[in-house]
Image: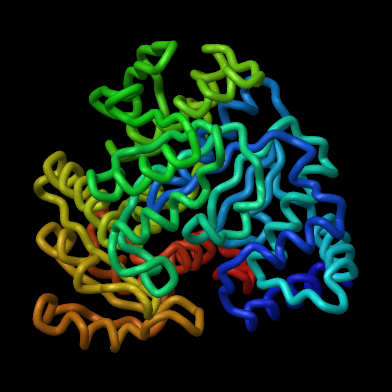
Amino acid sequence: MTYSATVQFLYGLQQHGIKLGLETIRALLTRVGEPQRRYPVLHIGGTNGKGSTAAMVASILQAAGHRVGLYTSPHLIDFRERIRVDGVMIPEERVTALVEALQAAATPDLAPTFFEFTTALALQYFADCHVDVAVLEVGLGGRFDATNVVEPLATAITTIGLDHEAYLGSTLEAIAGEKAGIIKPAVPLVIGRIAAPSRQVIEERALAQAAPVYAVDCEFRCEGPSTADCHYAGMAVQYGHLSCPLQGRFQLDNIACALALIELAKERGLTVSEEAVRMGLQHVAWEGRLEMVSEAPTVLVDGAHNPAAAVVLADYLAEWRRARPAARIHLVVGMMRDKHPREFLAPLLPLIDSLILTQADLPRASAGSDLREQLRDCAPAAQVAATPADALVCAKRAASPSDLICVTGSLMLVGEIKALLRGCSLSPLRG
């Protein structure tokens, strides 16, 4: 197959939808020799923050001289963003070759979903590349997520919030139970800032698995005026005046979780110096999360798509506004149909001067007009733009050079805006 045909094949697997369970992925990996057993793994779940934490951990381990595989989802522009070794995306020809091999292994009786197939692809690629360690971000939930076939050195659960309720449950406690499914017997667990009821669910699961628990603000913490100058106090080490380019005070907790995982990995044989910690944090990159992509006016993209992430974004926008009282904020929002626009926008509406609703180019995206109808009583002045390109033009027309345009509500929308600004085409696979 050509790479284009390969991507179309993967896209076609989305017809299988989301199937929660590990039987298919385990069978497929068994048929290709269980590549996930050939390297140590750090496994990171949670509602928000897991991707940033995974990127930090991978960057630090790479700075320490290790060959590092990083598996994350979704991608923003190019499918290959999901699978990286030492920060470099998997080559197109390797995608094609591995897909053909996995197709042959799955025939005739297995029907893997898109995410199961992609996870197997990543795990096999990491084995082929002889990585020293792989950092895996959980896709959806944890207990039945396709990544949950590994036996990790350590795990982390960063946050618990309402998201994907159709699959994970309608309460925070139910979601915590699903996320806690990545906890393994005697494998240490790092937990971020999680409210008491959800934390209790996780700690009870850890106790049942005899898994030691290390929690932010108990065994470790990261504090400071900003991510540009912060201090980590851990289980056995302390680092002062750390610097990380990722924006937002919430990233302090993600830094703390990442460094706690690094401490646990060091205890289990991965060498990491203080210099590597500092260099890895200083050079970490994680697109689409409080990312400035253009200036005059400033265009900020953030993949927040649930109420908890909206609160974090609102904190950042409030801080931005205090520093620039004369400037205005223009919000461009597009969301998937299974999200909650009213709850998402509640903390954001008091901070903004205009709202433009649009639709990402995906079948499961809400139309801008549908969003406006749902928001009619709380955002009566909202405008609708048919496409993300139209929304960006509309926002730029209304903005002065000192204003801020914030694009949020969906990582899919963020990917489209980034592609527009880069002048490049999108991979069709972005779900």
- Is residue 403 visible in the rendered image? The answer is no
- Is residue 146 visible in the rendered image? The answer is yes
Residue 96 placed where, x, y %?
84, 63
Q: Nearer the viewer, residue 254 or 168?
A: 168
User: Residue at 32% across / 52% down in the picture?
Assistant: 298
Horizontal side of residue 216 vs 50, given as left or right:
left
User: Residue at 68% across / 51% down in the picture?
Assistant: 83
Residue 35's place in the image compared with 146, above or below, is above
User: Residue at 48% across / 27% down in the picture?
Assistant: 281
Horizontal side of residue 196 vs 431, given as left or right:
left
Residue 383's place in the image compared with 320, above or below, is below
Which quarter of the image is occupied by the C terminus?
Answer: bottom right
Q: Nearer the viewer, residue 335 or 117?
A: 117
Q: Nearer the viewer, residue 262 or 84?
A: 262
Which quarter of the image is occupied by the N terminus?
Answer: bottom right
Residue 308's place in the image compared with 239, above or below, is below
Residue 222 placed where, x, y %?
32, 24
Horizontal side of residue 87 vs 363, given as left or right:
right
Q: Nearer the viewer, residue 318 or 104?
A: 104
What scheme was used to colour the molecule? rainbow
Horizontal side of residue 182 vs 244, given as left or right:
right
Residue 402 placed where, x, y %?
23, 50
User: Residue at 10% across / 76% down in the picture?
Assistant: 378
Residue 111 placed where, x, y %?
74, 76
Number of marks drawn: 0
Splitting the image into 4 quarters, where does residue 375 fall? bottom left
